[in-house]
Image (tube, helix red, strand yellow):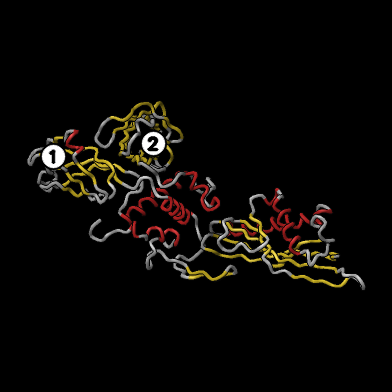
Amino acid sequence: MASTSRLAAVKSALVDRWGQRAGLSGVQIASGELGGNAASKERIELIGADTIEQDWAGIGRLSRDENLTLIGSIYVMRAGAGETVIRAARDRAFALMAEIELSFVESAAGSSIGGLVKAARARPFEGHDILTPRGRVYLLGFEVLTELTRLT
Amino acid sequence: MARTEQLDSPRIQAGLPGSISLTVYTDGALATITGTPTCAVVDAAGNAVASGNASAASGVLTFALTASQNAKPNVYTATWVATVGAVSMTFTSTHESRGSLLFTLAEARAWDNGAIGDATVYPDDLVLRGRDTVTDAFEDRTNRAFGSRYVREVYDGPGSQELDSRRLFVTAVRSVNERAAGTQTWTAYTAAQLLDVLAYPDGRLIRESLGYFTRGLRNVAVELEYGIQPIPGELRAAGLELLRYNLVESDMDPRATFLQNELGHFNLAVAGKGDSWFGVPAVDAVLNQPRYARLPGVH
């Protein structure tokens, strides 16, 4: 069956797979932006700034190769003030990032997101220590890159 | 020299088994209590409620009341006798039993994703005293009691059927006593006379058909239960939210009126400014509802 893009399937699969990981237990995970009223103090959002690159795979066939870049965000809030709380929020954010990275490298199924893509990986690209009325927040941006997925 | 403190809340919930306690210090350190301490509890009218052996651990005296002993809202006075440093000492403490408490310790621990869930950082006694602070603040701003409370008050007799108790949401009149001018002998209303006293939510007590409140000075003593019972859920949630902000430290400047960061631009409430009692919008919005409005000069 022809496929326009695997973007939607990839995002849903990522959320489902992360949601099953013990290391992410209790973390609210969503394939879109949750917004400022989200109840959880830890969340992972694929916030929707997605890039789709497609090239024709060959002459005479309607197959294409697709590369996806998904932008995600890790949000960790810790109630309180001062250096101890700042570190706790930041350390937890990077621990969640490590869990995400691990999900891609620990198995072939993880790397291919259950066979949806040829290969995928994740990496952080920016972080922010943020002061809010409810406490200290660490916001860690990351991207998920998928490579050379053949669409037919 | 020994001194005492009530570190946890002196309030317990009526109708349930309740534990009352008192902490004893000697020269700034928790006292070593030897032997078996005792405790005798009387209610606001001086009637014996319970007595017996108390327990002592790390300077804390504790005595348990059964549900039947603690059946109704009341104010208890506990007299403790304990041996501290080989000297027998007597201490007294006051405790209040209320129809409902604003929230439970477990609810406070779980609120806002466990913001005050760490019992090491936020010990039980700190949370429980914090609950009292919030409760008192709410009651002070609204002139309502949240959870049935007991009070015994003495009024000037109006010489009419109507007496203003100045307590909103009176739910029960337990007793009325009157005394004649120049005497100290109080005469209790009979059961029929007591049933004849009608209580109105605005605090008025009206004798329907069996006479009137005798005119006089400080000559009518009334025991009442009053207050909003059960406590509305929105009040309980507001209490939890305020407790959270009272206990958890913040790096925010308390005078800041707006905040801009990577998450957006936020307008901030400041305590005491405009309609904000506490600087916490979710709390102020509840207390500013007309149903909780304090009427100037009336109640």
- Residue at position x 39%, y 37% from top? B21
Mark 2 element type: strand
Instruction: Tell me: A39 left or right of A101.
Output: left
Name the outermost residue toward the left. B182
Please give the chain letter of the residue carrying mark 2: B
Q: Where is residue B279 in the image (x, y as percent from the top left)?
A: 43, 63
- Residue at position x 58%, y 67% from top? B263
**Mark linked to residue B210:** 1
> Is residue B5 visible from the viewing direction of this image?
no
Q: Position of residue B53 (x, y in %)?
A: 38, 26
Residue type, label 2:
Ile
**Mark linked to residue B64:** none
Residues at marks 2 and 1 touching, judged by CB atoms closer than 8 Å: no
| Local crowd size for mark 2, using a 10 Å CA cut-off: few (<14), some (14–19), many (≥20) | many
Mark 1 element type: loop
Q: Which label's residue is closer to the chain start, 2 or 1?
A: 2
Instruction: Tell me: A5 left or right of A130.
Output: right
Question: Which image quarter holds the C terminus of chain A?
Answer: bottom right
The quarter holding residue B7 reads: top left
Q: Nearer the viewer, residue B264 or B158?
A: B158
Q: Mark 2 points at which residue?
A: B20
Find the distance from the CA under tag 2 to the CA under tag 1: 41 Å
Please give the chain letter of the residue carrying mark 1: B
Instruction: Tell me: A99 left or right of B164.
Output: right
Q: Position of residue B94 (x, y in %)?
A: 32, 39
Q: How many labels does the image show?
A: 2
